Amino acid sequence: YFAASSEMEMVKWMKSLKSEMLTANNMENNFQIRSPKHETSIETLSTCSWDSGDYRDLEDCIYMEPVESRIPSFIDTKDEVSESENNEDVEHPPLPPRPAFYISSDPQRVSRAKTIPKQQKFEIDRSKSYSSTFQKLVKSLEGEPSSHVDDRLEQASASSNSESGSDSKSYWESVYFHGSKSKASEIIARLAENGVYLIRNGDDNTKVLLFYSHPMLKKFRIMEKEDGHVTIAREGPDFETIEELLYYYYTNDLPNVNMKLVIPYKLHSDYR
């Protein structure tokens, strides 16, 4: 440090030192001001371009980085803000509608079946007593067999007239599963073919229709109305028995699902 007799003298010496430092660092061209020469006297310094009333020139940084590499003191986030605002205007795809009266389950991701096997046909036990509505439906289907209802109906009819009618009866018995919910879901997920289904017990002593609809499992609670009829949709058709209900959805789409029942799990070719 050094001592000066007055502030004015101190400023003169500081300006002289600053000028020498600028010269030593080749900084004259970086500042748009006229820098004093080495031989300039201290008296001249007081009247040169360095003679400012404050200390701004003295306090300016000497060791400056190149202009290209300077980090700005303020980062303009205008573009970021506008980008964020624009994102709010992006139209997202609408969510699929939630099916009315649908009882959701935890969806389980399963792989698509390698090759969907030929749809198996089903049969109905003619020896069992069904309502007149159901019998009319059977007759109409016999006249115009669909992809799900064909010659197994005739086989069932033939077998029902003999002692071998147990084969026909076993068809509807094969739809019921008496194990746990997790095991039922595991079976349907493993078969992984649209329309394969089973009936399991629910938590509230009701029955649940569990089926596969790619890419997940779906289920309907079978509700019993005051008159004893059963249905899976409050505004949908009702039936006297669960078998009639299942038979109906072999030829009609399930509520809010563009799919029909195809085959009970026990009759699926991949079931073991």
Image: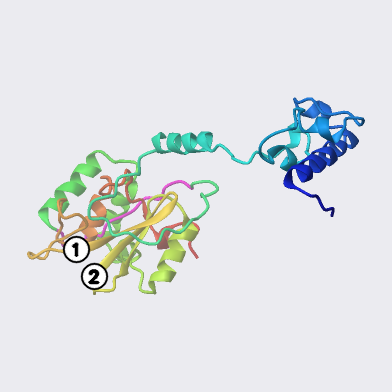
Is residue 69 found left or right of 101 in the rendered image?
Answer: right
The residue depicted at 49 percent of the width and 46 percent of the height is: 116
Residue 174: image tag: none
Type of residue at label 2?
Answer: Thr
Q: Residue at x 59, y 40 (%)?
A: 74
Q: Residues within 10 Å of mark 1 (few under 14, many from 20)?
A: some
Which mark, residue 206?
A: 2
Which quadrant holds residue 26? Answer: top right
Q: Is residue 91 visible?
A: no
User: Horizontal placement of 194 versus 37: left or right?
Assistant: left
**Mark 2 in CB contact with mark 1 (< 8 angstroms):** yes
Q: Main secondary structure of the magenta part?
A: loop
Residue 36 lies, with reference to residue 173, above or below; the image says: above
Q: Residue furthest left?
A: 227
Q: Quadrant of residue 172?
A: bottom left
Q: How is the image coloured?
A: rainbow
The three-letter amino acid code for the residue at tag 1 is Met
The stretch in magenta equals: 117-130
Q: Is residue 209 left or right of residue 132?
A: right
Q: Is residue 55 visible?
A: yes
Residue designated by label 1: 223
3 vs 165, left or right, is right
Query: How far separated are the C-alphas under marks 2 and 1?
Result: 7 Å
Residue, x 82% and y 28% (percent of image)?
35
| As drawn, 34 above or below 109 | above
Seen in the picture, residue 209 relative to 181 is either above or below; the reply is above
Classify the position of the N terminus by image quarter. Answer: bottom right
